[in-house]
């Protein structure tokens, strides 16, 4: 991550802390799995959806997450499918770990 992005992230973190009813990007990431499984309680769900509208980074995160799940589902039948370059390695690992049942 570029240093400039770090500053933006910190600034956003500060804004989120000073606004009621907002979740942080970290909380958002923690909610993603439950949200996609439709297991997020109504209260958290509305906060989550508000955060998506406010935060471009998390929109991209959610998008990458959904695409990775799609890919990992398809990869069950064929291991030849490559994960796109724009999906971060650690995200892929986290998803594969989370999807293990
Ligand atoms: Zn965010």
Image (cartoon, helix red, strand yellow):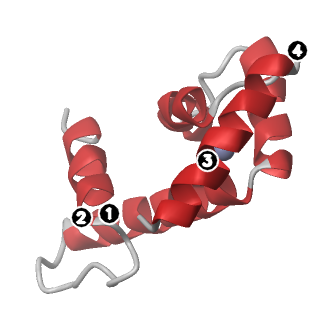
Residue at 74% in and 20% down? 17
Identify the residue under disc 1: 73
Quarter residue 69 falls in: bottom left
Identify the residue under disc 4: 20
Work out whether residue 45 or residue 74 is closer to the camera in this orientation and state it. Answer: 45
Identify the residue under disc 2: 89
Q: Quadrant of the N terminus?
A: bottom left
Give the number of the mark in front: 3 or 2. 3
Q: Earlier in the sequence, mark 4 or mark 2?
A: 4
Give the number of the mark in front: 3 or 4. 3
Give the number of the mark in front: 4 or 2. 4
Residues at badges 3 and 4 in contact (C-beta under 8 Å)?
no
For residue 14, the mark is none
Q: Earlier in the sequence, mark 4 or mark 1?
A: 4
Identify the residue under disc 3: 9
Residue at 57% in and 41% down? 36
Work out whether residue 75 or residue 16 is closer to the camera in this orientation and state it. Answer: 16
Q: Earlier in the sequence, mark 2 or mark 1?
A: 1
In space, the residues marked 4 and 2 are separated at their CA atoms by 33 Å
Compared to residue 37, the image places residue 27 above or below, namely above
Residues at badges 2 and 1 in contact (C-beta under 8 Å)?
no
């Amino acid at each position: 991550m570029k240093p400039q992005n770090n500053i933006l992230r910190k600034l956003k973190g500060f804004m989120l802390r000073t606004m009621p009813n907002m979740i942080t990007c970290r909380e958002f990431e923690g909610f993603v799995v439950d949200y996609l499984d439709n297991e997020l309680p109504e209260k958290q769900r509305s906060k989550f959806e508000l955060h998506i509208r406010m935060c471009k980074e998390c929109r991209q995160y959610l998008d990458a997450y959904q695409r990775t799940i799609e890919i990992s589902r398809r990869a069950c039948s064929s291991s030849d499918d490559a994960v796109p370059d724009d999906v971060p390695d650690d995200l892929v690992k986290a998803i594969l770990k989370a999807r293990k049942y």
